[in-house]
Amino acid sequence: MQRFMKKKILVFSNGEKIGDGIIKLQLLHEIKTRLPDYKLYWLTNKGKTVYSSTLKFIASNYIDEILDQADLSPFFWNKISKKYNLENDFFDYILDTQKSVIRTIALKRIKHKNFISGSANGFFSSKKIKSNKKRKYYLNYILDLLDLIVSKKNRSDFKIPISENLEGIISNILLKHKSYVGIAPGAGEKNKIWSLEKYIELCNYLQVNNKTIVFFIGPDELYLKEKLKNIFPHSIFIEDHITGFQNIEIIMATTKYLQLAISNDSGVSHMLSTGYCPLIKLFGPKDSTKFTPENPNLFSISSSDFNSKNINKIPVSRVIEEIEKVLI
C-alpha cells in the first residue's frame, strides 16, 4: 500500500526582522487557511527570521519547518545551499516573495511543480503575473501571488492570537471602568521620531480628556522612562507589572484593552497593529503607502501631507484632530 505523502509549499524570503515578521503573520495564516493539508516550509537566503526566535510562539502554529540562512547559489556547479542539502527536495509550490533576479534563479534550482514569483515582472513564474503600476502595500503584493496558487474572494479577518493567561493578568491591571490610550514615542531611527515635546503636549490633552496613558518604551529608550514617569505619575508602563512573557507578547496583548494607540513608524507600531484597537501611526521620511496595511483600524499621518520629510512638521493639532475622529 502506497503511503500518503503530504503536499509541500516552500516560501522564500530575505529574512524577517520584527516588523516584517509581524506583518507577514497574516500570510502564514492565509496559507494555512487556504492550504490546510500542505506542509509549510519557510526558507531565507542570508538573513535570519524572527519566526525561529522572537515570534516562534506564534509562527510555530503555522510553519512546519524553517530553513534560515540557506545562502543559495545560482550556479549549477555549486550546491544549491551552503547550509542545507536541497538537491533531492521537491515542492508542489515555491512562493518567491522577493524580487532579486539572482536570488530567484538560485531558488528555481530547487525541484518543484509550480513556481510563483514576481521577480523580473513574473518572467520566471509558472503562472502569469498581472502587471500593476500602482504601488501596493507589500503584504498585498505577496497575497496577490498566493492568489495564483489558490484564489480566495475575501481574505481572512486575521487578528494576532493572544495568550489567555496573559489576557487575564492584564485585565487585573487595566481596569474596565477606565479609558486607556497607548503611546509609543520611540523608534530605531531618529528621523522617524516625533519629538518628545510634541508627545508630552499630546499626552496632556489626553489626560485632560480623562484618558490614562499606557507607555510602551523600547529597550534602547529607557532614558525616557524616568522623565515620563515624573511628568505623568499616573501613567502605566505595562511591562513593569508582568513577568514570564516577552515584551512583544505583552504589547500585543495590551492592545485588547486600549481605546486607541499612537506610535511612530517603528517595530513597536507593528506590535500595536494587532487589529484589536485603532492605531494612529506617524510617518516621516518613509512612504506611508508601502508600510500601511489596508486595515480599517489603522490611520496614518505623514509629514508629506505638510510638504516635508521631517516628521516634526506634523502638528499636534493634526494628531488631536485624528484622535477625535477615531474616538467619535
Image: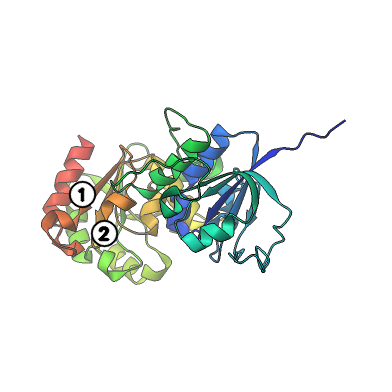
Q: Give the residue at mark 2.
A: 232
| Quadrant for the C terminus in the image | top left
Front one among 286 and 319? 286
Q: Residue type at mark 2?
A: Phe
Q: Is residue 275 above or below residue 230?
A: above
Q: Is residue 120 above or below residue 150?
A: below
252 lies left or right of 323: right
Residue 321 image position (x, y, % from top left): 14, 45
Mark earlier in primary sequence (2, 1): 1
Label 2 element class: loop
| Quadrant for the N terminus in the image | top right
In three-dimensional space, the C-alpha distance between marks 2 and 1, rounded to whole angstroms, equals 11 Å
Q: Can residue 307 be seen here?
A: yes
Residue 16 image position (x, y, % from top left): 49, 58
Q: Residue at x 35, y 59 (%)?
A: 266
Labelled disc at residue 206: 1
Colour treatment of the image = rainbow
Q: Is residue 217 above or below residue 177?
A: below
Label 1 Cα crowd, 10 Å radius (few <14 / some 14-19 / many 20+): some
58 lies left or right of 283: right
Residue 42 image position (x, y, % from top left): 59, 52
Q: Can residue 213 be seen here?
A: no
The image quarter containing residue 81 is bottom right
Q: Residue at x 75, y 37 (%)?
A: 5
